[in-house]
Image (cartoon, grey):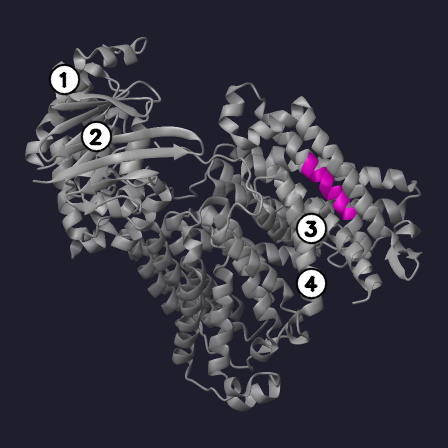
Amino acid sequence: MVKLWKNNAVLWLFCAGIILFGIFTNFFLSPLMNDIFTNGCITLVMVLGLQLFMGNSGILNWSYMGFVAIGAFISGICSMPVNLKEQALPAMYPFLQQINLPFPVAVLVGIAVAVLFAGIISWPLMRLSDSAGVITQFALLIVMNVILLQWEQVTNGPRTFTMGAMKTTNLWIAMFAGIAVLIFVYFFRETTLGLKLRASREDRYATLACGINIVAVRYQSFLISAGLGALSGSLWSHYILSFTAKTFYMTEFFMILAMIIIGGSKTVTGVVSGCIIVTIVRKSLQQVEIGLQMTGMTEITLAIVMIVFLIWRPNGIFGVKEPQIFNNPSDFKIKEQYEKTN
Amino acid sequence: MDTLEVNGISKNFEGVQALQNVSFSIQNGEIFGLIGPNGSGKTTLINVITGLLPPTAGSVTIAGHNASHIPPYKVTRLGLARTFQSIRLFKDLTVYENVEVGYVGIGGKRKEAQQRSEQLLSEIGLIDLKDQLARELNFAHQRRLEIARALCSKPKFLFLDEPAAGMNETETKSLLEYLKTLPATKNLGVLVVDHDMSLIMNLCHRIHVLNNGTTIAEGSPEEIRHNPQVIEAYLGDTHE
Amino acid sequence: MNFNIILEFSINTLALGSLYALISLGLVFVFGIMQLVNFAYGEYIMFSGYLLYFLGVFTNLPWFLVFAISILGGAIIGFLSELVAFRPFRGRSLEALFVSSFAVSLILQNTAVLSVSPRSKAVDLPAIFNEAVQFGEITIPIRNLLTIAVTIILLVGLLVLMKKTPLGIAMRAASENFPAARLMGVPANLVISIAFIISGFLAGVVAIFWSARSGAVEPMMGQGPLLVGFIAVVIGGMYSLTGSVLGGFAYAVLANLLSMFLPNELLSFRDAFMFVIVITFLVIRPQGLIKGTYTEERVG
């Protein structure tokens, strides 16, 4: 049991840090900081969901944002009061207007629909690697986006989907979700599924030679990732309360991609750090943008930073192994023995 | 008694006949050598048997089960493990994790994989490096790691594709000693492909010789050494 | 059906197909050699489009000079982007290249937003682009005829380049088997740079005809052609130049037919249909209609 604490000390440190900061922010800091923190936790869930698949499989799943969108819309539809839907979203299918479920159930339904859709559509995609894989994922995103953008009776089409004035997601819910997903995605790496997926990232042929059905492994992981994406979408929709399909598209994907690249795609600690860094940079730059009237500066800066990191530090800040505090093999001892046996 | 049977394997690549009617069988407990000049089709044959390529004709059975025209991961699960000529390790996984994958891959549980990994790494002499990333190992250690990973799946048959390539004399000798013990200690049959003639002659019980995709000889090391067709095939290609 | 309507439809579809063929050719040049899906390609088009806008609206240069400079601009931005954002990744993982091309695309888009305006700007084109010509009972916009003519000229030119010149042969060798080509003395940097220059050049030409259709330029204008290019390349064949051209025409025919025959409620989903077709192709026949000559890595 002690091993559980020692081996994963950095993880627990992060969790404690997030909890403490959350408590501090809630009682002592401004509404703006509360907003940033809550947003940050929701984004953390989103980026972790992406990392679970992309970081461990090496496949860029562009389509991820589509599942975030599904979670957002479906959970919103399920949780909104009936009369609010009839007023604000008159074009919606009556049977959808009549649904009214408590928030947690609505979130679960959102996740279920996303996972179901992923389950039906993604199996053939999992055999594609390299360029064909990337293009297909991209194409899938476009398909999902167009459908969500045009299907008036479900998403209000290109018009804003408004969910009323009451934010259901608050700081505590976001924080709890963030911590829970952080722990989940961290330990996913160490499960048999996680290990197999990570192997498939390193060398496809060797993975096959080890008896692993890569398609099945990718498929299961993709579904989990889609579910987490839908979860983050549900939290987000119940926070920002008005959005369209365009909200869950390229720009936001780019942001979480930047977090993964800068922090390091192969480790969870890397992704968390990336999330913190990019959130800070983004919020600061946005203030500058407004002040100097220079829209677009945030994206340009982050894009340049991303390219720089890709060139010089492709494994991000933390590299490929989760950092250890207590169990670092004594490098000197290893080096000694290594040289002796050679 | 487990047998791996290769029956009349032919492989045609859009007009190029890479393999023609190759047949042999490997028994549990023996070390079987596969040799031939460069381009004779050895690696293609291995890729066909391990399922990476479908044969144009012929079949493979492993311990009585059909092993042809099935995906490579299923071939492994029938009890055939392999190493690669160009060393295919999981570079950014640790040495420990690399070996674990060997067991987890065929459906094993992580806990047991960890135990087996410890044991195999100790046997093969890499236990002190277990937390290093595979990419940090030197060449000879990487080859050993690949073998450990293959052994972790408790295979009935082990295919080694140029296991000593790039090693110096001492390393090769040490590997040779270790490989000799495998059929008995691990209860398996081994197939070795290599260009190092002294390694092959020293290690193998039987040798099968390919040239231009067809079999030109099969027999004991002594027989092969004196076979005129083999000598002719290697003219200009000797490694002794 | 009325013969005239069919003729009109055919010619206009031919024009659209020509445009799409040019778009997909631009993508395939880079893809063939580097297996890179260049997300920034759309922005090469946008860049040329904006040059067109600035030169056309703010200067008095003669049209052929305006066009020449815009097209040259496209070629240059293609060349520069390779130097800065793709060359450092040579030999690295494909994901890094994709992410990099995505980043470049965003940088260029936002630079346009930042330096000009997030809103669209009307382009000034020679009057001839807005006129139409009468052939008996059918009306054909002149720009469609121009598109077809320019495409034919460029296709012939590229064909000659690829089949008859040493450079073209080197490029084809590089796209079939890059490492082997290098070993045989093909200068990697030169070949790749030329591929990007041609890609940017084609983007410049596309920019002229694309903005002629919409009458304006805006920061996101590259997205439309990019998606077209994706679809055309996948359907026609990712590893073959003729394939990509075919794909362009096939897409134009398919898109126009869908527009004509889809029930009204489903019309807005037309793009979704197109991409579902893309996905289907990738899953069932990833090499597209025309199989190319790319050899995958040998396993050993």
In this view, the mark in front (4 or 2): 4
Residue C68 location (% of width, % of height): 83, 37
Amino acid at dot 3: Phe
Disc 3 chain ID: C
Q: Secondary structure at mark 4?
A: helix
Q: Which residue is mark 2?
A: B144
Disc 4 chain ID: C
Left or right? Give the position of B103 relative to C115: left
Residue A278 visible from this viewpoint: no
Residue C201 within the magenta-colored segment of the rendering: yes
Q: Secondary structure at mark 3?
A: helix
Q: Do the CB atoms of the residues marked 1 and 4 lie less than 8 Å apart?
A: no
* Distance CA(mark 4)–CA(mark 2): 61 Å
* Distance CA(mark 1)–CA(mark 3): 63 Å
* Distance CA(mark 3)–CA(mark 4): 12 Å
Amino acid at dot 2: Arg
What is the magenta range? C198-208
